[in-house]
Image: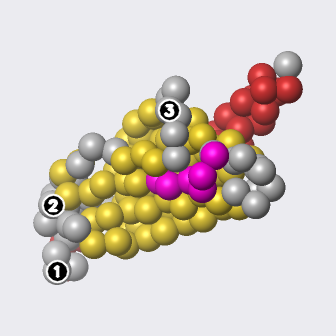
Amino acid sequence: MKKMKLKNVLKGSFVMVMAALVFGFVTSCSNDDDDDIPGTNKTHKVVFKAEASAGSSIEIAVYGIDGNPTTATSLSGTTWSSPEITTEAGAMSANVAVNAIGANASSTLKVQIWVDGELKKEGTSSGQYLSASASHTF
């Protein structure tokens, strides 16, 4: 019963984080005109990663480019990595949110966004119930 309740809390907080990321992207890009910005018509290779402290378990990850999320469920273990994604030319942002259950109150979770082989953004969380997110604008 306790584990079921925990999963519901994690899913609820996860949905809230993703909604905030998508809302932020939509409102920040609604009036963009990229015709005069150099480099906006480039593609990028993006990989999302997560690492939890020993004894923790990554459970779910939502990641995507420009508000097109992919959800990875039924995960386990302390590390996770998405497949490499090649963005469309002119893509605006990359977002990731990951939930995990820590081994104890001092557990940690780190998420990263790698673009063209370089670490661009990192987000962290600590505690027993872990939810970390990161967002990168190209």
Residue stretch rendered in magenta on the structure: 50-55
Q: Position of residue 82 (x, y in %)?
A: 34, 45
Quadrant showing the N terminus: top right
Q: Residue at x 55, y 65 (%)?
A: 123
- Nearer to us of marks 2 and 3 is 3
Residue type at mark 3 is Leu
Residue 53 magenta: yes
Q: Which residue position is annotated with label 2?
A: 43
Q: Which mark is residue 38?
A: 1
- Nearer to us of marks 1 and 3 is 3
Left or right: 125 as drawn, with respect to 50: right
**Nearer to me, 104 or 35:** 104
Q: Which residue position is annotated with label 3?
A: 75
Q: Residue at x 72, y 30 (%)?
A: 7
Q: From what the image shows, is residue 19 above or below residue 110?
A: above
Would you say residue 91 is visible in this rendering? yes
Residue 39, image quadrant: bottom left
Q: Position of residue 92 (x, y in %)?
A: 32, 62
Labels 1 and 3: the sequence-earlier one: 1
Q: From what the image shows, is residue 97 above or below residue 44?
A: above
